[in-house]
Amino acid sequence: MHKIAVVDDNADNRLIIRTILEDQYEIIEFSSGLEAIEGFRNNRPDVVILDISLPEMDGTEILRRIREDSQLHDLPVVALTAHAMVGDREKYLAAGFNDYVAKPILDMNVLFTTIKRWAPAPG
Amino acid sequence: MSPTPTRVLLIEDAEFDYLLTRRMLSSVPGQTFELEWASSWQAGIEAIRRASYDVCLLDFRINGGDGLELLKEARQSGCRAPVIVLTGVADYRLDVEAMQLGAADYLVKDQLTPALLERSIRYAITEARTTDELRRQQQEARSSELRFRSVVQSAGDAIVLADEKAKIVFWNQGAEAVFGYSEAEIIGLSLDVLMPERYRERHRAGMERFRVTGKAHLIGRTVELEGLRKDGTEFPLELSLAAWRTAEGTFFTGIIRDISERKHAEEMRCAKDAAEEANQAKSNFLARMSHELRTPLHAIIGFANILTQNKAGNLTKQHLDFIERILLNAKDQVRLIDSILDVSKIEAGRMDVEAAPADVGAIVRDVVKQLDAEKRNPGVEIVVRTPQPMTPMVTDAAKLKQVLVNLIQNALKFTDRGSVTIDVITGRDGAPVRIDVTDTGTGIPAGALQEIFEPFQQLEMGTNRRFGGTGLGLSISRSLCDLMGYRLDVQSQPGVGSTFSVVLRDLSRLPRTA
């Protein structure tokens, strides 16, 4: 079973992703960036779903640290964010995110399709 | 002792006197003379015209004319060398006359000694040099003043001189241009006339204080004030003030620059900066608002979506229906937020055109596929007519898509039966020139055809309650079309239906503008 890490300071948001994906994936949750990076080193996930607006260290900074980390630099990271104005998708892809999903997720299939792109053949 | 020989011209008709003079000069110790002899009046004049000498010795009585006449003639011919007049007899009257004509000295021949001659020559040369130098300095001073005057006169700034009683004593052309007074009008008037009433008392007090204490706030500084023109208008100026004392009293020099244009430009820049700042603040606010409004909706929609799956199987049909309604309303709210943000962004001028080649047919089919899936009215058919093949055109695909979504959603909303047809019309080169969205809906009365493009306008025909929505769709669509240089037209017949047309243009020739 592929491991999906969810980094979001909002417990509701983590619960939603867990509930939607837990049948097909193993979910690990983090509520802050430092905790997440530490956790990734001990227990490397297959895909990271990363919120942008986080206290202390925001998603873009967490991504930068992941990309600079010799162990973690190639982790697929999907931005899941309510920064969803025109141009935001392009902005985050340009910042180095592998994929982008806007909050709110109107169609759950979008989430599944995106995850499958980075963690194929769930099992 | 001069290292170079002194050039001496002797105008003398008696050879004996020439020889005598030559001997005397050659016996002067430590100094050499280069003596040229002219033996007649005419030869003397020619020699003077031909060459230059350090000194000229002139016999008072000479063949062919009067020595004093020769002296006059020599001066008129431009002879600048000092002239020493030699004479056979001492005559006080002649002495004075020679001096008046500019002779440097007057020597009696039979009293002459080498030392006396040498001394007379030396004095004459020194005297001439001093006179030359003085003349040169005077000339320099004169041309310097001329230069200075022309600079002052032609300066673009106003240059005004006033005496210690504040009477204007000098006024350049720049001052005339700035204040409107001619030199003739202003000379002798008080500086008061150049300043608004409110400054005059302070100015008088300042002048008085300077007179008593020698101190002034403005001297040596550049300050910004307002001036008063002849026509009574005020203008901002920059004043640099200097004071100087002469034997004739104290004078003030004011250099005044009209800074109206600079002030105006500064104000414009400030206003522009403020507007830019306000716009930036608005954009930041919009971005934050967007984020904050979406975040709770994410949870609402997320949990509602989970519930619709009814994984535990314990929800009733009615529960699921309610959940479906929560979802639909929440999704409507997301669209509402998007629309309001779009309007705000358009109004803030923060919407950029991102032009790239695109397949307009594919864009239309994409939009229709999405809307067909969401369609809540099974009695209406969506028809797409796109000619094949179609030449790609440069457009902003995201904005064109948004316009089409709005138009087609609108058409579906106001159509109960029949169809919504999307026609892509191409030009001779196969590139799209127009997209028509035609419905068989309620139609729009002629009087309301312009109103519908205003924000928050939806036709008041009792339809407000029936047809949801913000009334922003058409307004946004028109703004987006304007942004891309497209035209959004409408034709309608109440009871028959409406056609909205997007008249396209290729954006490859458009610079990317905000």
Image (cartoon, coloured by chain):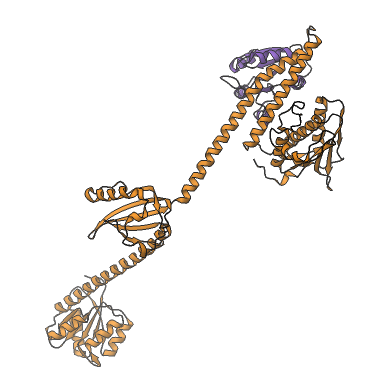
Chain colours: A purple, B orange
Residue A111 falls left or right of residue B277: right
Residue in front for this viewpoint, B237 or B51: B237
Q: Residue furthest bottom?
A: B64
From the viewer's side, name the closer residue of B429 and B300. Answer: B300
Quarter location, residue B485: top right
Name the quadrant of the N terminus of chain B.
bottom left
Residue at position x 55%, y 38% from top? Answer: B275
From the viewer's perspective, tell me whether residue B467 is left or right of residue B244: right
Q: Is residue B330 left or right of residue B262?
A: right
Tell me the residue at 60%/26% (across/down).
B288
> Percent x, y for residue B513?
65, 42
Q: Is residue A95 above or below residue B501?
A: above
Quadrant in the rendering for residue A53: top right
Query: For the C terminus of chain B, which image quadrant?
Result: top right
Residue B366 locus on image (x, y percent): 80, 31
Q: Does residue B180 sit above or below B110 in this rendering? A: above
Left or right of residue B288, residue B487 in this image: right
| Residue A52, above or below B474 | above
